[in-house]
Image: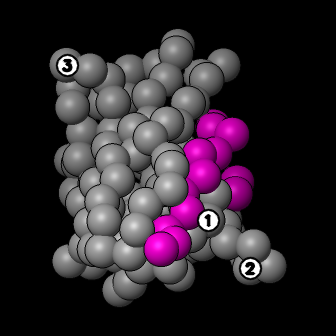
Amino acid sequence: QVQVVESGGGLVQPGGSLRLSCTTSGGDLKYYTIGWFRQAPGKEREAISCIGNPNKITYYTDSAKGRFTISFDNAKNTVYLDMNSLKPEDTGLYYCASDQAGYGCYALRYVRSDYDYWGQGTQVTVSP
């Protein structure tokens, strides 16, 4: 099975930036839909952004639009989530998930079964 790995989380001040990375072993991400999700303490997991398959169309929640950018680097087999103007409410455990069929990307909903493979998460903390 495909192994999904996220990285790039950390502690940043409000207004700062982070780049999260998602890559895989055993799969070429150009054939996959990739979604980014966030789970804050005490809250349900939510979709943040998605890049579709096969056409790499991108989608963002209202809270992410204008601040976050999802992109795909074919040479590195990596999907990035560039996060700018970070706010304390952006704090949470960020997950990357992949799906070969590409279902559900446009909807930006958290339905775990929509994605075949999930990473273990990378922590983002936004605090003074």
Q: Residue beneath label 3, please?
A: 75
Q: Residue beneath label 1, please?
A: 92
Q: Earlier in the sequence, mark 3 or mark 1?
A: 3
| Residue situated in front as seen by the camera: 72 or 42 | 42
| Residue situated in front as seen by the camera: 95 or 1 | 95
* Rendered image quadrant of residue 46: bottom right
Magenta stretch in the rendered image: 112-128
Residue 104 numbered tag:
none
Gap between marks 3 and 1 measured at Cα: 29 Å
Q: Is residue 66 above or below residue 69?
A: below
| Residues at marks 1 and 2 touching, judged by CB atoms closer than 8 Å | yes
Residue 3 in the image: state x and y as whole percent. Answer: 61, 23
Which residue of the protein is positioned furthest toward the top in this rendering? 26
Residue 43 numbered tag:
2
Q: Amino acid at mark 1?
A: Gly
Residue 113 in the image: state x and y as whole percent. Answer: 70, 54
Q: Amino acid at mark 2?
A: Lys
Gap between marks 2 and 3 measured at Cα: 36 Å
Q: Earlier in the sequence, mark 1 or mark 2?
A: 2
| Residues at marks 2 and 3 touching, judged by CB atoms closer than 8 Å | no
State the residue at coordinates (50%, 56%).
11
| Residue situated in front as seen by the camera: 8 or 43 | 8
| Protein image colouring | one colour
Residue 45 in the image: state x and y as whole percent. Answer: 68, 69
State the residue at coordinates (63%, 58%).
93
